Image (tube, grey):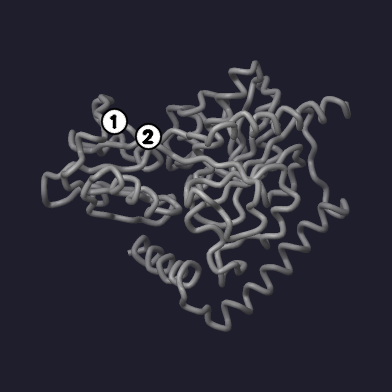
């Protein structure tokens, strides 16, 4: 019941944020209050009225301007892998959304997702670098420093000003972009779009080949998420996604933008029976079981919560980050320059 109510509220809000329905006056009034509080928080840290904790190593923030899925988590994992290849010892700090843990702690790959949170657990398994979670993000990040990390990736940390940062990477959904352009809750924006001017780099995930609908996206780097195989949850065996083409499947997605997952499958010729759930939804057996014997495909983020309840017909679909030509190198150059600037100040 609680999940159905959350899904209903989410659907109603998205009908306002991403379609033509105007927001009711009281949502606009709440947005004005939200915007004032957001600006006050940022100014307080900028003027050092509120303290920001600076770590003894560089901090890279990867975040969103909007709520909902933009492809940020795969990018964090990809960047952790690239930094490892360059000889760094990266660690990832995350809020631990969807989990019950409140105190800062390190995440183990064997953790229960209900405790650590689905995104944090997925990051630990994908990146194979230390991951720390906690509401107190500076304290969680310090745990990573304590275990030898010399560069910190702050997942979804753009609005968490208590942790000082050396580089800001903002990820934008190329399809939905900024919706109606309003602040929460009348729109999807956590901060006004002018906030992009202070970011070190903007990465647009997917969308049209030419992004021209917003001047602030000029010069943005381009990436997309690609899927080529499905992996059986119970057995771990891979299967080319093309083998599902022309067949009907149940597709389950409890992520910020479930439609992105469904559209990706449909683009491969798969006939999708869609089942969207709220972001970070706690999945039970009834959420992934249906009256027929069709295959069930789900996101990798959802799969970490289903290993104990999956059957032989349950599959997850991992995605790979793919950049436009030259953009991968451009992003890594921005990151390395920020590290060098930090080293020059020490």
**Does residue 135 appear anywhere in the picture?**
no
Q: Is residue 201 visible?
A: yes
What residue appears at the point 36 percent right and 42 percent down from the top-left corner?
299
Q: Quadrant of the C terminus?
A: top right
Report helix, strand or loop for mark 2.
Answer: loop
Asked whether, in this view, residue 152 is left or right of residue 290, the answer is right
The residue tagged 1 is 231
Quadrant of image for the N terminus: bottom left
Q: Which mark is residue 296?
A: none
In the depicted view, which residue is nearer to us: 173 or 57?
173
Disc on the earlier residue, 1 or 2? 1
x, y percent for residue 124: 50, 30
In the visual, does 19 lie left or right of 55? left
Q: Are marks 1 and 2 in contact (CB under 8 Å)?
A: yes
Q: Residue 144: x percent and y percent?
A: 65, 28
Q: Which residue is mark 2?
A: 318
Structural crowding at the residue carrying mark 2, measured as other residues with C-alpha within 10 Å and reported as few (<14), some (14–19) or many (≥20)? some
Q: Is residue 81 above or below residue 71?
A: above
Name the residue at 60% across, 20% down.
84
Secondary element type, mark 1: strand
Density class for disc 1 (Cα within 10 Å; few <14, some 14-19, many ≥20) is many
* Relative horizontal placement of residue 143, taking residue 265 as reference (left or right): right
Q: Quadrant of residue 335?
A: top right
Q: Residue 27's spot in the image, x, y percent? A: 57, 77
**Which image quadrant for residue 130?**
top right
Q: Which residue in the rendered view is the most extreme toward the bottom? A: 25
């Amino acid at each position: 019941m609680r999940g159905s109510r959350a899904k209903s509220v989410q659907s109603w809000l998205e009908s306002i944020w991403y379609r033509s329905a105007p927001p009711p006056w009281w949502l606009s009034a709440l947005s004005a209050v939200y915007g004032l509080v957001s600006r006050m928080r940022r100014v307080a840290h900028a003027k050092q009225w509120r303290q920001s904790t600076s770590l003894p190593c560089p901090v890279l923030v990867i975040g969103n301007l909007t709520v909902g899925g933009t492809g940020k988590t795969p990018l964090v994992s990809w960047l952790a892998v690239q930094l490892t290849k360059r000889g760094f010892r990266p660690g990832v700090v995350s809020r631990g959304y969807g989990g019950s843990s409140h105190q800062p702690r390190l995440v183990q790959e064997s953790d229960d997702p209900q405790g650590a949170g689905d995104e944090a657990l997925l990051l630990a398994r994908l990146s194979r670098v230390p991951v720390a979670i906690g509401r107190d993000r500076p304290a969680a990040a310090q745990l990573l420093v304590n275990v030898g990390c010399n560069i910190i990736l702050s997942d979804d940390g753009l609005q968490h000003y208590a942790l000082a940062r050396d580089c800001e990477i903002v990820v934008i959904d190329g399809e939905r972009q900024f919706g109606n352009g309003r602040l929460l809750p009348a729109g999807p924006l956590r901060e006004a779009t002018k906030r992009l001017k202070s970011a070190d780099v903007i990465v647009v995930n997917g969308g049209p080949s030419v992004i021209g609908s917003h001047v602030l996206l000029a010069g943005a780097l381009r990436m997309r998420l690609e899927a080529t195989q499905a992996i059986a949850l119970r057995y771990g065996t891979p299967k080319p996604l093309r083998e599902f083409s022309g067949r009907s499947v149940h597709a389950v997605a409890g992520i910020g933008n479930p439609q992105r997952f469904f559209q990706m499958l449909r683009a491969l010729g798969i006939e999708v029976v869609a089942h969207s759930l709220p972001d970070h939804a706690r999945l039970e057996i009834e959420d992934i079981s249906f009256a027929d014997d069709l295959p069930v495909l789900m996101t990798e983020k959802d799969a970490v919560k289903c290993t104990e309840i999956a059957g032989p017909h349950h599959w997850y679909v991992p995605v790979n980050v793919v950049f436009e030509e030259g953009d991968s190198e451009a992003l890594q150059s921005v990151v390395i320059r920020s590290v060098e600037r930090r080293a020059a100040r020490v």
